[in-house]
Image (cartoon, rainbow, N blue to C red):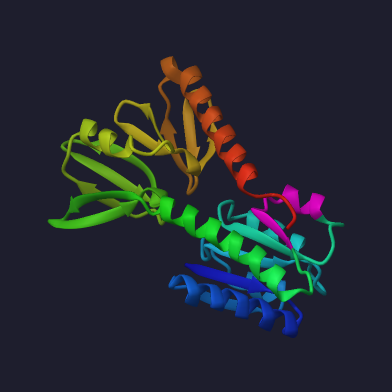
Amino acid sequence: MNIALVDDMPRELTRLSGIIEEYAADRHIPIELKTFGSAESLLAGYRPLQYTLIFMDIYMDVMTGVEAVKKIRESDSETLIVFLTTSVDHTFDAFKVHAYEYILKVPENDKLKANMWHVLDDVVSLHSLSEAGITVSVDGKEKTFPFSDIVYVQTEKNYIRITDHHGKISLTRMTFSEILSLLGQDSRFLQINRGIIINMDYIDTFGKDTCVLHGGFHLPISVREQKKLDQIRRNYVFSKLHNRQAKGGALR
């Protein structure tokens, strides 16, 4: 699991890093931690989904944490953001950039540690769920695709074309009913037309006859089933937001 930690106070950066490193050692979880002394240094060369989780201090010189996350959200809507703050003054602004959680940087180390470890436990649990997937044969070799990496699948003659979040296409020889059965294990997948299944986490826009996915993929929607499909999509988004709010969103 890759974690970024951003704080412009060297003492706090050391304290927070120690808490995360202690968590990794205690839980026996491999964590790659990268620290940044400013929002600008994180944004330099930032790539979407580069980190599983970003701990972001709100109060920083030059660019605040909220301003930095607004920049991140322009290209990355999925990475989990946890704001670290010494005050509740900017929590409304933080909600608007879809933060996963907010933690008060209290001076008591034990309390801060307990709150950070609680969030880390939640994220590890979410990450484990997202890593479930399917294993199929590609070019004569077994290849595993985490559900979270699959953008959409589509039939192509006697093959199934799998497009991942990097835009890479893999072909596997199987029937559409077989891949539908495999992806049907996970609620994020929706068949939008004959021979096409999408991952609803990657939807940009959902129209009357076309679905646009992250990466600029335009896929046709079954016009006859459009209302039904749109309702399923809405229910999925509502359920996802509800679960996220139930898990986080409260200052600790």
Name the image quarter holding residue 82: bottom right
Q: Which residues are magenta?
A: 91-103
Point out the image quarter for the C terminus. bottom right
Classify residue 85 as left or right of residue 181: right
Provide residue 176's location: percent of width, then percent of height: 23, 33
As drawn, 82 above or below 108: above
Provide residue 21's location: percent of width, then percent of height: 55, 78
Residue at the right extreme of this rendering: 89
Viewer can see residue 144 = yes
Provide residue 64's location: percent of width, then percent of height: 79, 66
Residue at the front extreme of this rendering: 110
Viewer can see residue 165 = no
As drawn, 160 above or below 104: above
Please name the residue shown 16% across and 43% down the image. 173
Q: Nearer the viewer, residue 69 or 80?
A: 80
Reply yes or no: does residue 111 show up in magenta. Answer: no
Please name the residue shown 49% across and 38% down the image. 212
As drawn, 213 above or below 139: above
Please name the residue shown 21% across and 35% down the image. 178
